[in-house]
Amino acid sequence: MVDVVLLSGSPRKNSNTMEVLDVCAKEIEKNGLSTEIIPLRGMTIQSCVACNKCVEKGNCVLKDGLDEIIEKIRKADGFIPASPVYFGTARGDIMSALQRIGKVSRGTDDFLSGMVGGPIAVARRGGHTLTLQEMSMFFPINDMIMVGSRYWNMVFAHAEGTTNEDEEGIEMVKLFGENVAKLIQKIKS
């Protein structure tokens, strides 16, 4: 079992989103918790069809690999989804994933209830705040605890490997990761 699952919505192998999640994960690990970064890259995440089979079966019946990720989240204490910004919003596959994760939680054992986390957005120039707002809706409707920092969890980056150029953004992601770890430890003690 890992303490915090970080989910990347980027389709790129060496993406800025993965780089930012790596920074966040390292900060969480510095604070004594284990992490796993799971990329959606290469997966075709289907949208929830509201079949409610999760209520009777205890898991999502759509066979695209998301159910295995849901099982890892179910056992964790924290959850952090991150998305690059595409056309001003979060990528569709991460939103489909979040909707299905929430549906399975609400239809089964409410495993998201009381879980700690929050979203991260990565973009070239704009759309961060709308992407964060869009992903943030997932947390309160699932009775989760959303953690903050001193600013929004967003990083400006364009070409691969340029996330460190946004020093303030990286510092906010580090603080966010530290706050996630500290809150989980306080809840568990």
Image: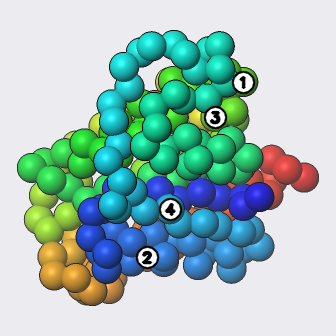
**Which residue has dot 2 on it?**
171
Q: Give the Cα distance between marks 3 and 1.
A: 9 Å
Could you say which quadrant of the image residue 120 lies in?
bottom left
Q: Position of residue 152 (x, y in %)?
A: 36, 56
Dot 3: element: loop
Decide: few, some or many residues near mark 3? Use Cα within 10 Å; few <14, some 14-19, many ≥20. many
Q: Give the Cα distance between marks 2 and 1.
A: 35 Å
Kindly identify which numbered label has been placed on residue 112.
3
Compared across the picture, whether 65 is left or right of 74 comes to left
Dot 3 amino acid type: Leu
Question: Residue 169, can we see it?
Answer: no
Q: Nearer the viewer, mark 3 or mark 1?
A: 1
Quick one: which residue is furthest to the right in this view?
Answer: 189
Q: Nearer the viewer, mark 4 or mark 3?
A: 4
Q: Are marks 2 and 1 in contact (CB under 8 Å)?
A: no
**Which residue has dot 4 on it?**
38
Dot 1 amino acid type: Asp
Compared across the picture, whether 152 is left or right of 114 comes to left
Q: Are marks 1 and 4 in contact (CB under 8 Å)?
A: no
Q: Are marks 4 and 2 in contact (CB under 8 Å)?
A: no
Q: Give the Cα distance between marks 1 and 4.
A: 22 Å
Dot 4 amino acid type: Ile
Dot 2 amino acid type: Glu
Q: Give the Cα distance between marks 3 and 2.
A: 27 Å
**Which residue has dot 1 on it?**
109
Which residue is drawn at the image coordinates 77% and 58% (left, top)? 1
